[in-house]
Image: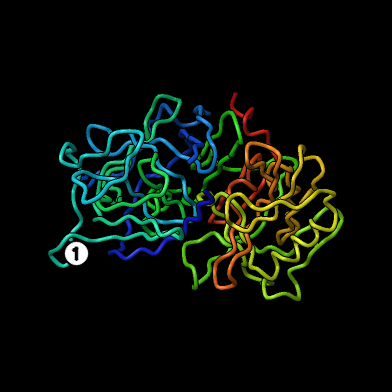
């Protein structure tokens, strides 16, 4: 199943402040389907280079974090395309099955439900595939473990406690919202280095997510592009895609409705595939069709993907994404083509969107790039990297 994570949140919004994260790394898992304390980072961790192993599966990336006192571990989707961090909570009106036990707030001494006009503050997140979470906002201690052995503790962090949840493919315990919104986890970290984050997604092996100074992406081979904030979709990390090359054929966005100067595509870790508006998407598909020497096949996923019968990925052309500022990303064939039906059918990993829907640069296309976000300089940086070997 192709999952597209877009959210609508209705809740009471406000921000908190916290001490600066000086750089730490936490677990990521790639899988298929309170008082007035401030956040704190142990001095013994400063200057360290922590890392953590991950477990690979096949469509979204999960990270381990702990909520409550005593700490209760959950595995949640890392999602730069959403704001609120939420987990399933007992008692449930309806909870889907998940791989691990569900968080019980009554067993945490630091859980405190938020109040809005003498009532609990509701939140609701509705996703593109008709799944949802509904519940109430709360403040809770969030603890993130680094491999230095010293935890990063965020007291009074605003989270969502989901008590009525629907999901097509159960497994994970919730979402970690990492966009620019005031309730996102990275915003609530605050401090001297707000908005610094990087990750390196692998199709196998290990991967990491970093915050603070450890998240800075630099060195040879790095390309950077400006990220934009839009009033239409606040909180999203927008990039400006100028063109796509299919082999030697360059398809400009200039002259199409997709063209923009201040952002036309969202970079999103919570969406698997890449989404283009239909008219531009068809131009890219036509360029692929022109050079692929194979028999077309029906899309087994039902998403109208461009598919071919083939026993090898080698017949498909290299695709390059050209972002503004000269950030040209030459994508590996794994990034742009996927094998389906247990072999024998390969499909282009780009879905054609309704023009009213947002275009998305998904996590499969980001595989084997060290991707860094710096909201102070308004840049997203990419460094071609063997992510599965980076921290081995």
Q: Is residue 143 above or below residue 157?
A: above
Task: Please say whether residue 50 is visible from this viewpoint.
Answer: no
> Which residue is painted at 63% across and 41% down in the image?
341
Look at mark 1 in the image and give the residue it sits on: 116
Quadrant in which residue 69 is drawn: top left
Q: Which residue corresponds to the image point at 82% horizontal and 51% vertical from the top-left?
A: 292
Query: Could you tell whether 176 is left or right of 38 in the image?
Result: right
How many labels sit on residues? 1
The part of the image, by quadrant, that contains residue 367 is: top right
Using the image as rendered, state which of residue 90 and residue 222 is in the foreground: 90
- Looking at the image, which residue is at 56% across and 50% down? 373
Secondary element at tag 1: strand
Pinpoint residue 343: horizontal percent, then vertical percent: 67, 37
Rendered view: 63 above or below 307: above
Quadrant in the picture for residue 306: bottom right
**Disc 1 packing (10 Å; few <14; some 14–19; many ≥20):** few
Residue 172: x and y, percent? Answer: 39, 40
The quadrant of the rendering that contains the C terminus is top right
- Left or right of 122, for residue 304: right
Q: How is the image coloured?
A: rainbow
39, above or below 250, in the image: above
Q: Is residue 114 above or below residue 106?
A: below
Percent of width and height locating residue 150: 38, 27
Residue 155 seen anywhere in this rendered image of the structure = yes
**Residue placed most toward the observer, 273 or 379:** 273
Instruction: Please state if 201 lies on the left or on the right of 12 as rendered.
Output: right
Q: Could you say where residue 305 lies in the image, as x and y percent from the top left?
A: 65, 55
């Amino acid at each position: 199943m192709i999952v597209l994570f877009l959210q609508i949140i209705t809740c009471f919004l406000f921000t908190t402040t916290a001490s600066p994260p000086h750089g730490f790394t936490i677990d990521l898992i790639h899988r298929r389907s309170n008082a007035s304390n401030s956040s704190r980072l142990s001095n013994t961790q400063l200057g360290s280079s922590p890392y953590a192993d991950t477990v690979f599966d096949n469509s979204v990336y999960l990270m381990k974090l702990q909520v409550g006192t005593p700490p209760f571990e959950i595995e949640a989707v890392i999602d730069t395309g959403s704001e609120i961090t939420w987990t399933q909570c007992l008692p449930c009106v309806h909870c889907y099955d998940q791989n691990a036990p569900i968080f019980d707030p009554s067993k945490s001494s630091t859980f405190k439900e938020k109040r809005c006009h003498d009532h609990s503050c509701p939140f609701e997140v509705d996703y593109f595939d008709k799944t949802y979470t509904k519940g109430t906002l709360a403040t809770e201690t969030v603890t993130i473990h680094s491999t230095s052995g010293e935890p990063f503790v965020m007291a009074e962090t605003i989270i969502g406690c989901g008590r009525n949840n629907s999901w097509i493919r159960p497994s994970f315990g919730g979402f970690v919202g990492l966009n620019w919104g005031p309730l996102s986890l990275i915003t609530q970290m605050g401090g001297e280095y707000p908005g610094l984050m990087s990750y390196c997604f692998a199709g196998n092996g290990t991967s990491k997510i970093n915050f603070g100074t450890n998240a800075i992406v630099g060195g040879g081979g790095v390309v950077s592009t400006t990220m934009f904030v839009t009033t239409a979709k606040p909180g999203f990390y927008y990039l400006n895609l100028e063109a796509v090359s299919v082999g030697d054929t360059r398809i400009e966005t200039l002259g199409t409705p997709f063209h923009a100067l201040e952002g036309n595509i969202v970079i999103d870790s919570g969406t698997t595939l890449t989404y283009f508006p239909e008219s531009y998407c068809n131009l890219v598909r036509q360029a692929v069709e022109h050079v692929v020497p194979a028999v077309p096949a029906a899309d087994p996923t039902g998403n109208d993907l461009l598919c071919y019968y083939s026993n090898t990925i080698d017949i498909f052309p290299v695709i390059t994404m050209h972002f503004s500022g000269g950030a040209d990303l030459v994508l590996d064939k794994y990034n742009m083509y996927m094998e389906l039906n247990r072999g024998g059918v390969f499909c282009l990993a780009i879905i054609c969107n309704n023009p009213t829907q947002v275009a998305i640069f998904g996590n499969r296309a980001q595989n084997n790039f060290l991707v860094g976000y710096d909201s102070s300089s308004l840049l997203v940086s990419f460094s071609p990297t063997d992510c599965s070997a980076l921290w081995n």
